[in-house]
Amino acid sequence: MKSEGLIGFIGLGNMGRHMAANLAKAGHALVAFDAAGTAERAPPGAQVAASTDEVASRAETVFLSLPDGAASASVAQEIAGAEGRLTACVVDTSTIGVEAACRIAQSLAAAGVEYIDAPVSGGVAGAAAATISTMFAGSAQSFERLFPALKAMSKNPFHVGTQPGQGQAMKLANNFLSGLAMAGTSEAVCFGLSQGLEMKTMLDVLNVSTGRNTATSDKFPNRVVTDTYDAGFLSALYMKDLRLYMQGVQAARTPEDIATACLGVWSRFVDASPGADFTEIYRFIRDSSSGAS
Ligand code: NAD
C-alpha cells in the first residue's frame, strides 16, 4: 500500500469502476461509494463506504466519476458539509461543462475544499486498460502531488491549466471534434459510395491522405465496416457533451457555425435513436440521404 492514506472514490459506474480498480491495482488504499450499490462495484481490496459522508470523513482526496453536473454539485455539497470532514481536495473526472465546474469550484472553495476539474477521454475500454487521457485543471503543486494516482488510471495525464473549467473546455473541444469526424466521415463515405467507390478503398486512401481522422482510422474500420457498431458510447451520452460544448461556445462567444450544423445532425439522430451506439450515426446519415446505398 502507498503511504499517503486513503483515497476516496465516488461513482463506480462504467468508467469509475475501472479507474478505481486501476488505483487499487497500483497499491493505493481506497474507500469507495456508489449510490446504486458499492459492494458489487468496488474493486477488490477497497473499503466499502455507506455514504458520501463516510468517504469525506475518511479520505483527504476524493475522486468523482458521476453522470453530470447536477450529480457532481450534489456530491460536492455533501462532501463540503460532511461531519468530521477530512477531505481537502476533490478531483472530478466527470464531464459536466465549464459553467458547472466553475460553480462547484466556487462553492467548495467557500468550504475550504480544493476542486480539481479533471475530465477524461478514451472510453470504457480505455478506462479498463488505463490508457485514458486526463485533462487536469488545478495548481501545479496538486498536479505533482496527485500524479502517481493520475498515472495509475491514465496513460496520459495532462496539466492543461490552473482554472476550474479549463479541463472541461479541453474535453468538450475534443468531443466536439470526435463527433464532427464521425458525422463528416459518414457524409464523405455516402458521397464516395454514390460514385461507385468501395468503403474499404476509401478508408485505405483516407488513412494515408489528408482526410484521416479518428472515424477513418478507428470507428469506420473497427465498428462500421465490421457491421458491429459497438464503440460502447451511447449517442444520448454524446449529446450531453455536444450540448455542453455549445453552451460553452455561446457563453464565450466564439465561432459556432460548424458546431451548429454538427449539433443539428446529431440531435436528429439521437431523437430518432437515443439508445444507439455513437457509430450508428453512419447508418442514420446514409438512410436519410437519397443517393447513397
Ligand atoms: P455511469 O452512469 O455508468 O456511472 C456513474 C455512476 O455514478 C453510477 O454508478 C451511479 O450510480 C453513480 N452515482 C450517480 N449519482 C451518485 C451520487 N449522488 N452519489 C454516488 N454515486 C452516484 O457513467 P459513466 O459512463 O461511468 O460516466 C461517468 C462520467 O464520465 C460522465 O460524466 C461521463 O460523461 C464521463 N465519461 C464517460 C465516458 C464513457 O465512455 N462512458 C468517457 C469519458 C467520460
Image: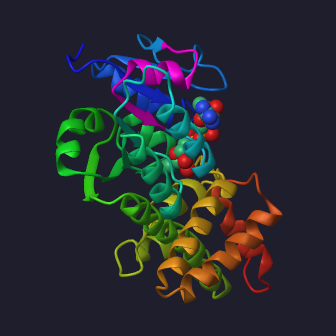
- Residue 107 placement (x, y as % from top left): 47, 49
Q: How many marks?
A: 0
Q: Quadrant of residue 162?
A: bottom left
- Residue 280 placement (x, y as % from top left): 68, 61
Looking at this rendering, what residue extends furthest in the front direction? 110
Q: Tell me, what colour scheme is on the image?
A: rainbow
Span colored in magenta? 48-64
Against 209, is 123 above or below? above
Against 89, is 225 above or below? below
* Residue at figure coordinates x 50%, y 26% from the top left: 82
43 lies left or right of 239: left
**In magenta stretch: residue 54:** yes
* Residue at figure coordinates x 66%, y 68% from the top left: 282
254 lies left or right of 282: left
In this view of the protein, which residue sits in the foreground, 178 or 45?
45
Residue 201 visible in the current orientation: no
* Residue at figure coordinates x 32%, y 41% from the top left: 154
- Residue 254 placement (x, y as % from top left): 46, 85
267 lies left or right of 125: right
In this view of the protein, which residue sits in the foreground, 109 or 205?
109
- Residue 137 placement (x, y as % from top left): 32, 55
* Residue at figure coordinates x 51%, y 41% from the top left: 124
Q: Quadrant of residue 1?
A: top left
In this view of the protein, which residue sits in the foreground, 269 or 287?
269
Residue 100 visible in the current orientation: yes
Against 141, is 236 above or below? below
**In magenta stretch: residue 223:** no
Q: Quadrant of residue 152?
A: top left
The quadrant of the rendering that contains the C terminus is bottom right
